[in-house]
Each structure stands twice: as structure tokens, then as C-alpha cells.
Image: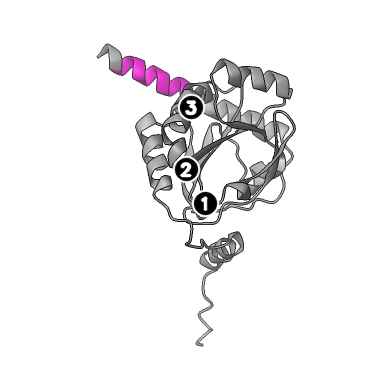
Amino acid sequence: MKRNALVFVALTVAVMAMLASGKYLDRVRKHGPMTLVGNVKGVEAPDFSLLTLDGQKVKLSDYRGKAVLLNFWATWCPPCKVEMPWFVDFQKQYGKDGLVVLGVAMDDAEPAEIGKFASDLGVNYTVLLGTDKVSDAYGDVQYLPTTFFIGRNGAIVDKATGLLDRKDLEDDVKRTLATVARTKPPSIQQNQAQMQSKSIPPDPRDTN
């Protein structure tokens, strides 16, 4: 009974933190056009170019053929701090199988401060400095943590918003590792066209 109460409290704190992060990001960010809309599973993940903490440029397309766990996080996000050690373990366990963990820091803090935070948690994967542009490309990331699982072919396998159970995240990692590189996912433009066609009812006068 006591354990259930503790779990409930932990989940409540996580949800409150996630909602607070959404309000903060929505207030401080300048919004641009969103790329990913609707159901993103199976859609090609938007490419991006971001800087690492030491100023090196990294593109998502550099990892084509790998299984990518793309995690949006921040130093002030308590649920992020819970799951980041799990990602460290995933990188250790599944890196040899082709998993690449990328952490996109959505902080206003200096790279040195972000780097110290990551180092204190033992982060063993690449940390990138997030931008409004990449957030909008991924559907306007408002709530942290938000994680995208991207297959070897560049298609999104799943999306996780908020703090999930470690097993659920690991199951997504395994599904992502099981993808093959040679299949081509639908493009972002095709996904947007499909969503638009679903939102426009057919004209009853059109008999063709």
C-alpha cells in the first residue's frame, strides 16, 4: 500500500513537472512552422544540424543505418533527470548493436553548465544544443522529456512524451534496433499531404 502511494506521488510530481516545462517552453520560444503533424509513426524523421557541447556540428543523417534514440530534455526538468541514467545504460548495452543516443538540451544555460549537469549524471552519449528550429521540425516540442525512436531507415518508430516506465522505453529501443535500413519511409511532405486530405471532407458534388 505504501509503495503504491509513493508511486502515485512520483507520477504526480512527474506530470506537474512536464506541464510546467510545457508552459515555460511555450513562453520563451519563438514558434515557426511545424514539420511533423498527426501520427508520426513510420514517417521520415526531419534531418537537422546541431552543435555539440564542444562546438562540433552533428547531423541526424550522419547516423543513417543506426537506431537512434533522440531525447529532448533540459537541466531544470526533474523527469529528465530520472530517465537519463536509463539512456546511459541503453547506450552501454545496445551500442554494439547499433543504438545511438542523442540528447538535445532545450536549455538557455551555457554549454559548460549543461556539460557539467550531464557529466554529473554519467552521460556517455552525445549531447546537442537544441534550437527553436529543431523543436518546430519535431512538431513543436513543448513538454519535456520528449523522445523519438528513429529506425535504421530514418523512419520514426515511436514517440514518447513525459516520463515512461523504463521497460516501455527499452521495448521501444528493441523495436527500433529491429528495423532495417533499406526500406524507405514516406517523406514529411507526403505525411503532411495525407493529413491535409483527411481534414478536408469530400465535395458531394464531385462524382468523378
Residue located beneath label 3 in the image: 88
Residue shown at 66% from the left, 22% from the top? 114
Count of picture labels:
3
Spot occupied by residue 138 in the image (x, y as percentages of width and height): 60, 46
In the rendered view of the protein, which quadrant contains the N terminus?
top left
Which is more foreground, mark 3 or mark 2? 2
User: Residues in magenta?
Assistant: 4-14
Query: Which amino acid, mark 1?
Result: Gly
Residue located beneath label 1 in the image: 65
Spot occupied by residue 2 in the image (x, y as percentages of width and height): 28, 11
**Crowd band around label 2 with a 10 angstrom C-alpha radius: few (<14), some (14–19), many (20+):** some
With respect to residue 206, does 109 lie above or below? above
Q: Is 25 or 183 nearer to us in this picture?
A: 183
Spot occupied by residue 172 in the image (x, y as percentages of width and height): 40, 41
Is 150 placed left or right of 119 in the picture?
left
Query: Which amino acid, mark 2?
Result: Gly
Is 141 placed left or right of 156 in the picture?
right
Q: Is residue 163 visible?
A: no
Q: Are marks 1 and 2 in contact (CB under 8 Å)?
A: yes
Who comes first in sequence, dot 3 or dot 2? 3
Farthest front residue in view: 96
**Crowd band around label 1 with a 10 angstrom C-alpha radius: few (<14), some (14–19), many (20+):** some
Element marked by disc 3: helix
User: Which secondary structure dominates the residues rendered in magenta?
Assistant: helix
